Amino acid sequence: MTTKKCISKNIASELGIPLKNSNDIVNSFIKVIKRKSSTKIVKLSGFGSFYYHQTPKRVGRNPKTKESYIIEPIKKLNFRASNKLRKTLN
């Protein structure tokens, strides 16, 4: 699994900068992505797109008691890899 710490270490070694600076870069990048996520789609060329969709309100049932209840709508985050990234992985 790749973590923020791992990404920061890779950036630091590749650019030859201190680990603290690369941590700042990664954190700033994440802040920008969070701010831009209000536009519904965040597209990173050559990497992929992050987008969300809202599930509709629906009726759920407890399988034991057969009692019905309303499941409220929620926003789900999805990622779609670009063709370039898919070719790299395969």
Image (tube, rainbow, N blue to C red):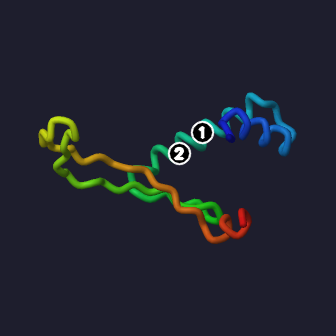
Q: State which quadrant residue 55 falls in.
A: bottom left
Q: Tell me what residue is drawn at x 80 percent, y 38 percent.
A: 12
Residue 43 pos. (x, y %): 53, 61
Query: Split into 4 quadrants, where in the image is the C terminus?
Result: bottom right
What is the spatial separation of the Cα atoms under label 2 and label 1, in whole angstroms?
6 Å
Q: Residue at x 65, y 39 (%)?
A: 26
Residue 5 sits in which quadrant?
Answer: top right
In the rendered image of this protein, does residue 29 appear above or below residue 45?
A: above
Circle on res. 32? 2
Q: Secondary structure at mark 1?
A: helix
| Residue placed under numbered mark 1 in the picture | 28
Asked if labels 1 and 2 touch by Cβ distance under 8 angstroms, the answer is: yes
Disc ID at residue 3? none
In the rendering, at what x and y percent does residue 36 appear? Answer: 46, 50
Q: Residue at x 85, y 39 (%)?
A: 13
Instruction: Report the amino acid beneath label 2.
Output: Val
Question: Is residue 59 found left or right of 80 in the rendered image?
Answer: left
Q: Residues within 10 Å of mark 2 (few under 14, many from 20)?
A: few
Quadrant the N terminus occupies: top right
Toward the viewer: 57 or 42?
57
Residue at (44, 57) in percent of width and height: 51
Q: Is residue 78 toward the left or the right of residue 64 in the image?
A: right
As drawn, 4 above or below 32: above
Q: What type is the residue that disc 1 sits on? A: Ser
